[in-house]
Image: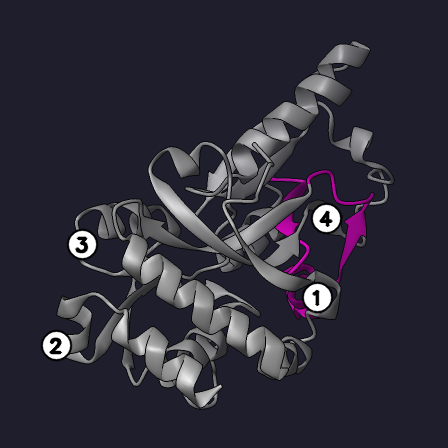
Amino acid sequence: MLLSCVASAQSLPQDIKDSGKLMVGTERDHPPMEFIDAKTNELVGFDVDLIRAIAGKLGLEVEFVHSRFEGLTPNLQSRRINLIISGMYDTPKRRESFDFVDYLSAGTTFYTLDKNTEIQEPKDFCGKVVTTNRGTTYPDSVKKWSDENCVAAGLPAIDVTTDTDMASEFLYINQGRAVGAVQGTEAIPTVLASTDGPFRVVGKPFTNVRIGIGFNKEDTELRDTILKTLEDLFKSGEYLEIVKKWGLDASALDAPTVNAGDAP
């Protein structure tokens, strides 16, 4: 394993070797993937632990560059960062610009306040306002679901609005600006535990996606080095330890994949 890590480190791009640092883009309000610990004011989460484990094997430090989710893509394109790890879904549309090394599975899920008794099944959202995180795949996924399940059944479409993060999502619902929202299955435990609720899930996940680390397409050396190091973490059991720490057992993969997401 040590020899493997040394070999992987040698295959890093020269500019990263020279700096000794990995510039990582993340959006810091997506628990349990990445968020600020209220007690320590430190960035924590599954993605944080995973990328630090990868970087540690390569002898690199990690410098996190924070932005809203919609700012991650331009930061990568402008090379302000080397990669994105922020609960980002690997989709065909995103793969037009980026490559992904996938490390978790996920699905998009509706939820609402427990007291919203008029919402008992997903179709009860037809004709109502549902909020989603801006810059994510969620708005398009909800619109697609609405077309197939509301409009196709002669029901009014879901009115999709967007917000900036999970905190604003909770605010919209509690203020009555939206009757519900969607999140990935990886974030649903955090939603259900939130003191802004109580919330409850409505129906089953309506997409099946993979979460990946995003790279510029021309950065094949970096992509392949990260992939090899991640494969080593899977084999050693370190990946599964991080998965269990953050309660993401149901989202774990058997092995990392490249560009394997098929959700819109």
Q: 58 or 68: nearer the eye?
A: 58
Q: Amino acid at mark 3?
A: Arg
Q: 78 or 189: nearer the eye?
A: 78
Real-space CA distance between mark 3 and mark 1, rounded to the nearest whole angstrom: 34 Å
Q: How is the image coloured?
A: one colour
Q: Amino acid at mark 4?
A: Tyr
User: In which quadrant will I find the C terminus?
Assistant: top right
Q: Secondary structure at mark 2?
A: helix
Whether residue 47 appears in this view of the structure is no
Give the number of the disc on residue 18.
Answer: 2
**Residue at 27% across, 53% down:** 219
Badge 1 is on which residue?
A: 189
Badge 4 is on which residue?
A: 111
**Residue at 35% across, 54% down:** 68
Query: Quadrant of residue 145 in the image?
Result: top right
Where residue 91 appears, as percent x and y from the top left, is: 51, 39
Real-space CA distance between mark 2 and mark 1, rounded to the nearest whole angstrom: 40 Å
Q: Amino acid at mark 2?
A: Asp
Q: Nearer the viewer, mark 3 or mark 1?
A: 3
Q: Earlier in the sequence, mark 4 or mark 3?
A: 3
Q: Nearer the viewer, mark 3 or mark 2?
A: 2
Span colored in magenta: 178-207
Q: Earlier in the sequence, mark 2 or mark 1?
A: 2
